[in-house]
């Protein structure tokens, strides 16, 4: 009887030891997964996020700006922009490619950084038609602090601006577009 009791105690002890070892290994695995997830979240919270859009403003929204903005929480580095299908000449007859984000690039764009380039001011009908008829796409390429490369393309949507702009044509002075 004593041998049987000792055997049972040994078996229970063995099962308990195996269970504790298994549960400990599962706990170590879950802890490692949580550490990796926390690291990924921390990295995601420090990623840059560059966006490109147009914005109308000024008195009666008479100006359109090309906005390049870092909406992420991390620093964007070596930001380079391109314009497709071809270069655009702004209201001052300078090509868009001659502006800093397009020719030199932006070496460092911290969070909430914003670059504004005036595309049109005191509209004329021809320039507005040119802008709307061409499907402009601004390409942007940049890196984060770890050297990870980001690339994106932003079609410039001018439809929200149309209808809120006042233009000048040869037949009348101030008329809203529609």
Image (cartoon, helix red, strand yellow):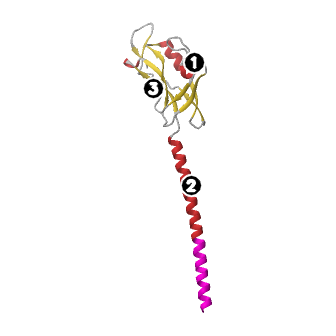
Residue of label 2: 33
Q: Name the residue rendered at 57%, 65% in the picture.
A: 24
The answer to whether the residues at label 3 and label 1 have Cβ atoms under 8 Å apart is: no
**Eye-nearest disc, 3 or 2:** 2
Crowd tier of the residue under label 3, counting other residues whose Cα lies within 10 Å: few below 14, some 14–19, many 20 or above: few
Q: Nearer the viewer, mark 2 or mark 1?
A: 2
Q: Is residue 36 above or below residue 51?
A: below
Alpha carbon of mark 2 to alpha carbon of mark 1: how far? Answer: 47 Å
Q: Is residue 146 above or below residue 62?
A: below
Q: Quick check: 44 above or below 29?
A: above
Left or right of 151 on screen, residue 92:
left
- The Cα–Cα distance between marks 3 and 2, rounded to whole angstroms, is 45 Å
Q: Position of residue 65 (x, y in %)?
A: 47, 21
Magenta stretch secondary structure, dominant: helix
Q: Which residue is mark 3?
A: 160
The quadrant in which residue 62 appears is: top left
Counting from the top left corner in percent of width and height, residue 90 is at 52, 15
As helix, strand or loop, the secondary structure at mark 3 comes to loop
* Closest to the observer, 103 or 175: 103
Q: Residues within 10 Å of mark 2 (few under 14, many from 20)?
A: few
Name the residue nearer the viewer: 70 or 108.
108
Please state, as top left, top right, bottom left or bottom right, where the N terminus lies in the image: bottom right
- Residue 103: x percent and y percent? 58, 20
Query: Which region of the structure is painted magenta?
Result: 1-19
Whether residue 6 appears in magenta in the rendering, the answer is yes
Q: Which mark is residue 97?
A: 1
User: Are the residues tagged 3 and 2 within 8 Å (C-beta)?
Assistant: no
Q: Residue at x 49, y 29 (%)?
A: 69
Q: What residue appears at the point 50 percent right and 42 percent down from the top-left corner? A: 45
Dot 1: element? helix
Q: For the point 61% across and 89% down, which residue is it?
A: 4
Residue nearest the observer in this picture, 94 or 79: 79
């Amino acid at each position: 009887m004593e041998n049987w009791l000792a055997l049972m105690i040994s078996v229970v002890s063995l099962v308990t030891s195996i269970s504790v070892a298994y549960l400990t290994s599962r706990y170590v695995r879950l802890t490692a997964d949580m550490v990796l997830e926390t690291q990924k979240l921390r990295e995601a919270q420090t990623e840059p996020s560059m966006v490109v859009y147009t914005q109308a403003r000024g008195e009666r929204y008479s100006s359109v700006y090309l906005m390049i903005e870092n909406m992420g929480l991390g620093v964007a580095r070596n930001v380079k922009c391109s314009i497709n299908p071809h270069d655009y000449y702004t209201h001052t007859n300078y090509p868009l490619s001659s502006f800093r984000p397009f020719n030199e690039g932006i070496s460092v764009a911290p969070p909430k950084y914003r670059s504004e380039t005036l595309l049109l001011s005191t509209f004329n009908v021809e320039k507005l038609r040119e802008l709307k008829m061409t499907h402009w796409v601004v390409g942007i390429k940049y890196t984060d602090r770890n050297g990870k490369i980001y690339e994106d393309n932003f079609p410039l949507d001018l439809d929200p601006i149309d209808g809120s702009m006042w233009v000048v044509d040869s037949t009348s002075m101030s008329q809203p577009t529609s």
